[in-house]
Image (cartoon, coloured by chain):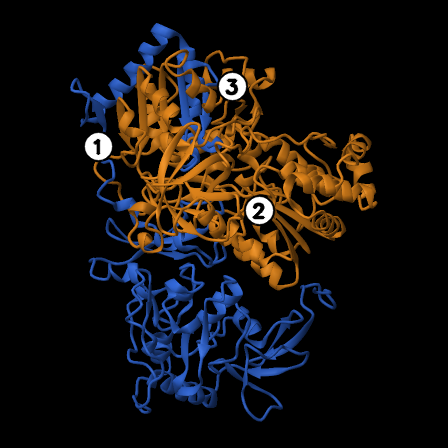
Amino acid sequence: MSNPLADMDKPDVIFCIGTNMTECHPVAATRIKRAVAQGAKLIVADPRRIALAEMADIYLPLRVGSDVALLLGMAHVIAREGLMDEDFVAARTTEGRDFVEHVLEYPPEWAESITGVDAKLIAEAARWYAKAERGAIYYTLGITEHICGVDNVQSLCNLALMTGNVGREGTGINPMRGQNNIQGAGDSGALPNNYPGFQDVLDPAYQAKFAAAYGREVDLELGPTKVTALDMCGDRIRAMIINGENTVVTDPDREHCEHALRSLDHLVVIDIFLTETAQLADVVLPATAWAETDGVCSNTERRVQRLRKAVDPPGEAKPDWWCVSRIAQRMGLKGFEFESAKQVFNELCSLSPIYAGLDWDVIEHGEYHWPVPERGHPGTPILHQGEFENGRGIFQLIRYRDPAETISEEYPIWLTTGRRLPAYHTRTQTGRAAGIEYLLSEERLEMHPTDVSKWGLEDGGWAMMSSPRGEVRIKVEANDRSPPGTVFASFSFNDVPVNFLTGGGYDPITHTAELKVCPVRVEPV
Amino acid sequence: MSDNSGNGTGFDFEITLDGEKVGVRRGESLYEVSERHRKEIPTLCYDPRLEAFGGCRLCIVELDGARNPVASCTMRAEPGMRITTRSARLDMHRRVLMEMVASENRDMDVDPLSGYASQEMAVLLDRYDARTGRFAGARSGRSRPDDDNPFILRDYENCISCYRCVRVCAEQEGDYAISVMNRGFETQITTEFEGLLGDSACTFCGQCVQTCPTGALADIKALANADVPGETEKTRTVCPYCGVGCAVDLMSRGDKLIGVQPAMDGPANEGALCVKGQFAFDFVQHPDRLAYPMVRGEDGELHETDWDTALDRAAAGFTAAVENHGRHSVYGVASGRAPHEAAYMMQRFIRGAFGTNQIDNCSRA
């Protein structure tokens, strides 16, 4: 997030797009609810009538995968009606003129033809956001899990730049990160394009820095993303080590994924349960879990906080960092003689400019948001104040593209996927917590009542849902949260492996799968 | 906003608190000013996160010029006010109030595992020596043993109608799942149509449980561990689910994890949690946990083994891959669920051992 969570009740206009926050980030959503209670206006764009949509002053029920069109239509209105923050655009951005020319080609009536959202509503939402004293954008995977995920994010950045809604309290472009330390995994350098602290692996200065730090030559080129690596399994990639990820259930196109892992010569999995992925491994190493592990995590607002051990782990389980460092030692490698999480974290801080002012003891109370460039620096709750990291904010000329697969006679229904409040991911954790099954005991396909009758199905009855990649048996729940023509399911239940169906395409830059759009057929069984 | 007039302390004006002049910021209640000076004014309906309610009247103070004591939580401080927070008269009033409050309840004492604030009433009963039973008689609140939800006990025979649960649900959570029905001894906290929580707008975030001062609403999962021997220890950490990063206090006895309470001073959550953070902690000690390393045997199955064997096997596989197919044949996937140290070590392994950038984490799926 560019702005802290504490800012969430400060905007006067809030624009939530592709975020089912009350279910996926419930505590953050309480701040939105408070802001609305205090009079903030709420604009919600989502294909499903989620709880946030029920609270919204303007609800934009767009077709799955049509976000770019919606955002172009909004940008058009802001440009056409002279609602841009000209001072901000002049002082802090570049390519503004080209951008305005570009968006003037896309009136809201055009956006309506793509998104299905009333052009008048699109225009009104644009006006509200542009005229806001403090307008804030919040988004989640509904924006990123598309073949055009980067385009979606850049479209949002364009809106913020043209209205000056960035770099101030209560504004910003705020992705809500979905996992407790997904931000931290990136901060720590577990990326094919960045060393720790987002230092570019293509930059010779950083290459030299890490070659020196790690005592060996480093590659001068990018690594493949995980998605690409899975495609290379059995070919270039022969051995893999996976830590705490149930890859075969969470990734799209499960059959492809299982086949990839089975074709490896060597698979090591470090996890707390014998997941579907661990069951494919040659070596499984038992990790200590949350509540058993000292460590550090970064939340969605870049706040760096300590995790503390409360109880001993079962049997001989060991911290993940210990497992990996000991494998390295067994390979005869030097430099892996770590004895504590503190030692590991402090090395990370010493190599990461955004953590340069932090260490294990400094973060004891969790009050710092990175970047913290030097000791004594107060941290950076709000990014992009004064100037952007790379100087000026650059407008990007984005064009709408259809999803990788669109509905057809054979697959006439849009499937979109996501989470539900009581279940987390593949339920390796919530599925083993007493009581959760009271709230959610099985997966159901959310389908509009008119579709239920149209396709000859029954509320509570079984259906077969299929895509070009496979089929799953699933119970139907008649529910008007999803609009006619669109259905929703989560990927939480292993007995309804929805990711057998998904995976029609990937964003060309991030390689994030289009998990939010998958044309399917649903038939009675 | 403070105008820093006068002395540059950030205060706007002064009042006299127990004979001492103290600074006040405009808009502060008498209670807030007194709390800053650690006057320990008793309250039952007060939760600093909620709008002051003025329901329990325990926070009364003497205000010069007012005939009767005033509720300090709802009375704004005004320049020149002179207040007294402790006196024989206040103690007498508070004691009678506590006797009356207690008379409506079945239990004076509840297990501290009931919830974060569950001891507030019992503590005040002792402080004011109010366990007299003087007003024994009618009781308010009907418990709901029919509510079979596995998380929230609804034992309204211990309810004192402070409405903290109703207010936290509305003001903090924005869920409006519960409300107040009837008045006087008939007062009842209820959902729409007097149904089960599971059929209401309740999201089982547990905020009502944690603010209840009597244990009328209680944490069923924690209470199930009431018989675990040992002292309850609290360990501050961060919730393991989404990216909001809510701070929690883990409750444990010995090596048994017995429950979770929200950290009221958690920087990201300020006391809030959701159903997962509040109640889905016990996966940690589930019998399915991996406790020993495993390696795949000749028979094609995974077998438990010792660390030496497992680490040697893990290392040998990577060494062989490099020897046979080069260093670009190895790939590492770090976790978005494990701490920094795990991700850092994974990339250090891939970059330090193989010199490649063949490392990623699970953020793309």
| Quadrant showing the C terminus of chain A | top left
Q: CA distance from mark 1 to mark 3?
A: 34 Å
Which numbered mark, 2 or 3, is in the foreground of this view? Answer: 2
- The answer to the question of whether label 2 and label 3 lie on touching residues, with beta carbons closer than 8 A, is no
- Residue A515 picture location, percent across and down: 49, 34
At 46% from the left edge and 53% from the top edge, which residue is drawn?
A479
Q: Tell me if mark 2 has few (under 14), some (14-19) or many (20+) residues whose alpha carbon lies within 10 angstroms of its own.
A: many
Chain of the residue under the numbered disc 3 shown in the image = A
Occupied quadrant, residue A166: top right
Q: Which color is chain A depicted in?
A: orange
- Residue B347 picture location, percent across and down: 44, 24
Residue B185 in sight: yes
At 72% from the left edge and 43% from the top edge, which residue is drawn?
A74
Left or right: A261 in relation to A511: left
Chain of the residue under the numbered disc 1 shown in the image = B
Q: Tell me if mark 1 has few (under 14), some (14-19) or many (20+) residues whose alpha carbon lies within 10 angstroms of its own.
A: many
* Residue at the disc numbered 2: A46
- Residue B211 picture location, percent across and down: 42, 67
- Find residue B292 and name its label: 1
SS at circle 1: loop
Left or right: A266 in relation to A50: left
For the residues tagged 2 and 3, is the chain the same?
yes
The amino acid type found where label 3 is placed reads Phe
Occupied quadrant, residue B122: bottom left
* Residue at the disc numbered 3: A210
Left or right: B218 in relation to A421: left
The amino acid type found where label 2 is placed reads Asp
Q: Which color is chain B depicted in?
A: blue
Left or right: B4 in relation to A458: right
| Quadrant showing the N terminus of chain A | top right
Comparing A462 with B66, the one in front is A462
